Structure formats: C-alpha cells, structure tokens
Amino acid sequence: MLSPLIRRYTRNSTWLYYIRIFIALCGTTALPWWLGDVKLTIPLTLGMVAAALTDLDDRLAGRLRNLIITLICFFIASASVELLFPWPWLFALGLTLSTSGFILLGGLGQRYATIAFGALLIAIYTMLGTSLYDHWYQQPLLLLAGAVWYNLLTLTGHLLFPIRPLQDNLARSYEQLAHYLELKSRLFDPDIEDESQAPLYDLALANGQLMATLNQTKVSLLSRLRGDRGQRGTRRTLHYYFVAQDIHERASSSHIQYQTLRDYFRHSDVMFRFQRLMSMQAQACTQLARCILLRTPYQHDPRFERVFTHIDAALERMRASGASLELLNTLGFLLTNLRAIDAQLATIESEQAQAMPRNESENQLADDSLHGFSDIWLRLSRNFTPESALFRHAVRMSLVLCIGYALIQITGMRHGYWILLTSLFVCQPNYNATRHRLALRIIGTLVGVAIGLPILWFVPSLEGQLVLLVITGVLFFAFRNVQYAHATMFITLLVLLCFNLLGEGFEVALPRVVDTLIGCAIAWAAVSFIWPDWRFRNLPRVLQRATDANCRYLDAILEQYHQGRDNRLAYRIARRDAHNRDAETGIRGF
C-alpha cells in the first residue's frame, strides 16, 4: 500500500522540481543567516533564481557544457555592469550592444536563447545591487555562487534520475496528443452550430502546441541518443516517440469537409460513434502518458474491439439504406485510420514492436544541432534582417532597456532598475503575448505589494522573513508556467522580503509599483510602434512555405507506395516539416 504511494511521489517530476527549488532557497538563506551576514541572501538568491530560469535539459556531458557556458556568460554580463556602471554613456552603449547580441544568439537554438535571457537577467540583477559591495568583483562572484549552488543540485538530480526529463517530455507529448484527439472528436458532433469556426480554431492551436512538444521531445531524445548503442531503454523511448508521431499523422489527416458529414448524417448514430471512438482514444493517450511517468505497463482497453464492431454494423446499415457511397467510403477511410491508431496503442508495449528495425535509417533522428562555424554563421546571418522576428525583438529590447536606463539617469530614481527588469519579462516577440503578460504583471505586482506590506508588519523577525522568502520563492516557480499573475505576486513578495533584510522593505513598495507601470508602458509602446508584428505576418508567404512542405511530404508518401511502407529518416523529416508548417499556418492564420 505504501510502496505505490511512495513511487507515485518519487516519480512525480513536479514534486521533485519543487523539492530542488526548496533546497536551493534554503541554502541561499540559511548560509548567510548562519554566517551572520544576511545581506548575502540577496545576490545568492538572485543568482539561484537566474540559474533556475535558465535550466536546460540535456545528458550529463551536455549539462556540464551548458553550465560552463552559462557561468561564463553570467560573469561577463555581471562584471561588465559593475565595471561600466560609473560611466553612463559607456554603460548605455554596452547595454545596447549586449542586449542585441545576446538575443541574436538565440538564432543558434533554444539552448543559446535561454542562456542569453539568463545573462540579461543577471545583468539587471547586478544593477539592483551595485551599491551593496565596495569591490566590483564581489557581487558577480556571489551571483555566480548562487547559480553554481542550484546547478549542483540539478546535476545531483540528473545523476539520480538521468532520463526523467525525457520521460516528462514523452508524457507531455501524449497528453497533448490526447487533447488534440479530443478536440478532433468534437468535429464529429452533429449538434455543433453550423458555420462555427471555434472548433477549428481550437484544433489549430492544439496542433501548434502538440508540434512544439513533439519537437522538444525530439531534442531530449537526440541529447541522450548520441553515443548510445541500442539499450532496451533507448528502444522503448524511440518506439514511444515514433508511435506518437504516427498517431498524430493519422489523426491530423482530413478526408472531407466535416460540415458535409455532419449535415448528411445528422439523424444517424454513426457520427456519435466516431466521436466516442476518438474520445476513447484520447483517454487511452492520457492513460499512456500516466504510465510513462509512473513506469507502469500500459493496458489497452478491451472495449475498443466492441466499439469498432458496432461502427462496422452502423456503416453496413447505412450502406443498405442507400446512403451516399462517396461519404460512406470517406468514413471507411477514416475508420481505417482509427483502426491503425488502435493497433499502435494496443501493441505499444510488445517487445516485437520495440525491437530495433533492421534498416538503420529507420532508427535515426534528424540532428538539427550546430555543425561547424559555417553553420553558425548561416543561422546568425538569417536573422540580420527586419523580416526576422528575432532581429526585430533584439532591436526592440535594446531600445526598451536603453530608454529605461535613460529615464533612470534623468530622474535619478534609486530603485529604477526594476523598470528594466519589468520590461525584460514583459516585452515578448509579438504584440498579443506582450499585452497578455503586461496585464498579468501589473495585477500580480499590485496584489503582491498589497499583501506584502502587512506581512512585513506582522512578521518582523529575521527568521520568519527568511522562511517566508523560501516559501514565496517556491510558489513563484510553482506558478511560473501556469499562472503568470500569481507568479508575479510571489516574486514581488520575495523582492520585498529581500530588501527588508536591508531595512528597506516598506521603502521599496511604492517604487516597485511605479517602476512596474513604467516598464510595462515602455514594453507596450515598443511592440506597438517599433516594427509591430502584424506588419510582418505575410500570410501568403507562410501559406507558400506550408504548400511546399506538403508537396515534399506527398512526394515522400508516393515513394512509399512505390517502394513499400517504412519509417525511414527522409520520410519522417518530410512529414515533420509539413506538420510544423501546418502548425505555423494555423496559428498565424487565426
């Protein structure tokens, strides 16, 4: 009884992540308290937060490489702030060049984009504490110490659970696949409103999220498959990933306008049966995701066979009653696809299905990592144009941070660097994302200050405030990706508690609110007037890319008809490119 409960929580990555954050924050608060210098809590905690926000999944060698690159970038960014801070003009020039340079590094891949964001964050954290220490190197080293402390905990967790992040990504892929199937099943609801585009809109968004998750899973797989020699765990992981791709391929196919099917079969039970079948397959994917996380065998639901039998009988009745042969054939093709999905789910745990294919090409993944300086230059040069969203974002952020810095210099605001911090978090590459974050940031800050001031009054003891600092830090990371307003509220509480260690908790409350409003206003103005994204959507070009990708995909399918069906790398690359372009078209089109 106890063993399954323990296994459930020890294999819950979310709880393990919270425990890691809790231990890290306990370390950054307990050590300064023990040394009798609570001022150390601020740089140690901020360095730990920056490291946690830039944590990247990879194998052990990759994590060590990422750690070295991250620490170097963190130190350069922090030391540059300390050294250039007395000279505003040089500082503004360095801020402009470093901001644009770090953001453009994101063109090399997600790893470099994440590290670049962390470097900018650590630079602004350094600005907040330039008056805390006499020597230029003290704060950078303390920020790095906090980052190293968190990464030591991360490396320890990786040694204990080396493939846990990969399992999480696989489970998320199947959860997203379940969501996609559930939304697709709603297209077969005969009671849906005529001409309603809402189900198609939801399906397009879900498809984009699913493709993003599958791509992230592929990156995790590649990082662990380098140098692998075909262990059983590798076969299992690859098999699950390939099955997810195959299910998505079949689930995303369309044979006819669904409105036509709904109108014709509105008074028949056949549409309800198809809807129920796809909904059951969505539930099966959800169950499979849970099994991946808990490392338990997946048991396929025996009711599926009865459901297929009843659908066959319903189609035969429709055929006998003289229904449209064309539409019945369409439903027959759809049923064939759903049978194939069922077969994939039913045999996913079989040893035979997980065996390595004889053709090595069927066991490979396309490697999109950097290959030499020519590849690096090619990826960077693609973004040296206003047509690139990354270039536009780099220019915007450079101007936003420089305007914020100029405002600080003109007004002499003591805590004005929160303007830069707010702008960094709020300003996103597109207008809608920025506007959404802007509202949540303001709400979270106002609520955080409203709650924080009474807390500072009723909890005056140092130990009590350190405990609250740990709690608010954990809650910030808990809500960071699910409720941004809540996360902002808790990080505001953390900031108030940190500055209250210096006796400035009540003093910084109002500046925190004012700086947040100013930073949000600057970010909104930037995305509204500096190369606004709606001028660069260029839907015809997006459609052309999607059409070209689907043409290559159809060529690959035709080749399969001529040479026999297999899972070779070239076919999977063509399929993935087509699905990625379709997802991009769906998101931009709506």
Image: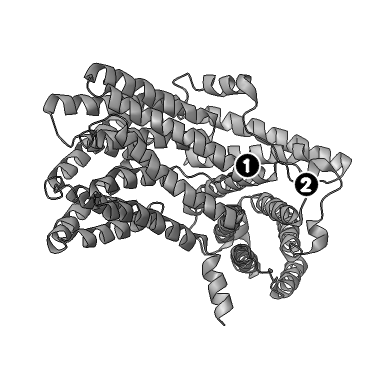
Q: How many marks do you count on the picture?
A: 2
| Residue sitting nearer the eye, 205 or 333 | 205
**Coordinates of residue 167 in the picture (x, y in percent):** 61, 56
Write the residue at 81% across / 51% down: 356
Is residue 42 shown left or right of residue 341?
left
Is residue 194 shown left or right of residue 434?
right
| Residue sitting nearer the eye, 53 or 85 | 85
**Coordinates of residue 104 in the picture (x, y in percent):** 46, 26
Q: Which mark is residue 579?
A: 1
Q: Which mark is residue 200?
A: none
Ranked by sequence position, the earlier of labels 1 and 2 is 2
User: Does residue 307 lie above or below 537 as drawn?
Assistant: below
**Coordinates of residue 488 in the picture (x, y in percent):** 29, 50
Image quarter for residue 411? top left
Can residue 197 be seen? no
Can residue 57 be seen? yes
Q: Residue furthest bottom?
A: 1
What amino acid is at disc 2? Arg
What amino acid is at disc 1? His
User: Does residue 205 lie above or below 402 as drawn?
Assistant: below
Write the residue at 37% across / 26% down: 99
Q: What SS does tag 1 mark? A: helix
10 Å neighbourhood of mark 2: few (<14), some, or many (≥20)? few
Q: Residue furthest front?
A: 35
Would you name the residue on which mark 2 appears? 229
